[in-house]
Every structure is written in C-alpha cells, then in structure tokens.
C-alpha cells in the first residue's frame, strides 16, 4: 500500500507526460471533428470562427511531439491555465450546438389518423453520429485549468523544468 502511494506521488517520466499530452490533444481533436456538423457560432459571429477550435489540439500536439523548451515552469503553468479558461469561455459564449431536426409525420386533418401510404412517402435522412462539442469543450477546459494550477509540477518535462534558471551558487 505504501509502495502504491509513493508510486502515485512520484513525477511521471517525460515519455508518459508527452504521451498523455498527445492522447489528450487527439481526444479534443476527435471531439471537434465528430461535433463539427452540429456546432454553430453565437451572436452572429462568422462561421469561420469555428476553425479557432483547432488551435487547442495543435498546441497539445506540438507540446507532446516536439516538446519545445521555450518557457519557464511558472509561465507554462499560467499558459496551460489560460488555455483552459479560454476553452471554458469559448464553450460558454462562442459556440453552441444546433438542434437536429427530424422529419415529422402529420396526421390526416379529416380523420385524425395516420395514413399508411403517407409513411412510405416520408423520407428519413440518417443523422450521423455527433458529439456535443460545446459541452465537451467546456469539460476539457475545466480539466486543463485544474491541471495547470494544481498539477503543473507533475506535468512538465525535464527540458522545461529548469529552463531559464541561472545557477548562482554551486554546492558541493
């Protein structure tokens, strides 16, 4: 039991951190693509604004594949937190899911019953599998914000851990 607790408390390897980033970015990308047909913008914003959603998985893939050592630990912390908050705000105010309208069968006005011949004339278009991009984007933003604030020291690779620090004292 103590070994399990100490294993959980340890910092994961760089390989595990990078794989987790890539998997999370692919999960966000899949959510965007599966919900693309039912996602619309709010407040009369142009539809090309939806393409901004692809920035978030792109950042995750770049950090996972290339692992650029360009920021200090504290800057990464607030960058990840800011990206999470941006995802939440986009989910709340910018994007919305469209309602999928299914065809309706109308009853005959005279008798109040449905004619069997009318059922064969009704065309039902299959709705592709979709995901609520709006809700999932907010959930992923919340997860990202929590990871940025609380677990950033466990989610940073060795390349970024000491970036920009100046060694002033050497202890022997």
Image (cartoon, rainbow, N blue to C red):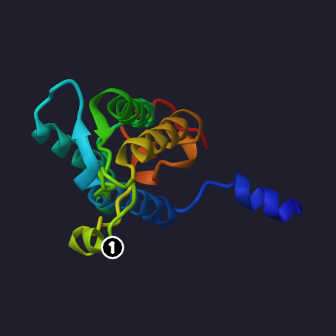
Instruction: Indicate whether 64 appears above or below 81.
Output: below
Q: Residue 26: x and y, percent?
A: 35, 62
- Give the residue at the far right of this rendering: 1
Which of 165/10 is in front? Answer: 10
Query: In the displayed structure, would residue 104 be above or below residue 145?
Result: below
132 sits to left or right of 150:
left
**Dividing the image into 4 quarters, which one contains the N terminus?**
bottom right
What is the x, y in percent for residue 17? Answer: 48, 59
Label 1: few (<14), some (14–19) or many (≥20) C-alpha neighbours in 10 Å: few
Considering every residue shown, the one lying at the far front of the view is 110
| Quadrant of res 134 | top left
Could you tell me if residue 163 is visible in this image?
A: yes
SS for callout 1: helix
Tell me how many marks there are.
Answer: 1
Image coordinates for residue 5, horizontal then vertical, percent: 80, 57
Residue drawn 39% across and 59% down? Answer: 113
Quadrant of the image occupied by residue 82: top left
The residue sitting at 61% across, 54% down in the picture is 11
Query: Which quadrant does the C terminus fall into?
Result: top right
User: Observer-nearest residue: 92 or 9?
Assistant: 92
From the viewer's side, name the closer residue of 159 and 50: 50
Residue 153 against residue 128 in the figure, above or below: above
Determine the residue positioned at 58% across, 59% down: 12
Name the spot of residue 157 as percent of width and height, x first. 45, 53
Location of mark 1 (residue): 116
- The answer to whether residue 67 of the structure is visible from this angle is no
């Amino acid at each position: 039991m103590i070994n399990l607790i100490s294993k959980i408390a340890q910092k994961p390897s760089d390989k595990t951190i990078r794989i987790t980033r890539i998997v999370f970015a692919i999960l966000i990308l899949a959510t965007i693509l599966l919900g693309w047909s039912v996602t619309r913008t709010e407040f009369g914003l142009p539809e090309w604004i939806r393409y901004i959603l692809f920035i978030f998985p792109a950042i995750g893939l770049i950090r996972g594949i290339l692992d650029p050592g360009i920021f200090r630990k504290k800057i990464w912390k607030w960058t990840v937190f800011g990206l999470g908050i941006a995802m939440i705000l986009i989910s709340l105010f910018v994007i919305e899911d469209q309602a999928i309208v299914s065809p309706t069968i109308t009853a005959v006005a005279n008798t109040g019953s449905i004619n069997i011949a009318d059922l064969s004339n009704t065309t039902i278009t299959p709705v592709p599998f979709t995901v609520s991009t709006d809700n999932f984007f907010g959930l992923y933003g919340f997860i990202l914000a929590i990871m940025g604030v609380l677990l950033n020291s466990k989610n940073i690779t060795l390349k970024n851990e000491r970036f920009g620090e100046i060694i002033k004292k050497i202890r022997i």
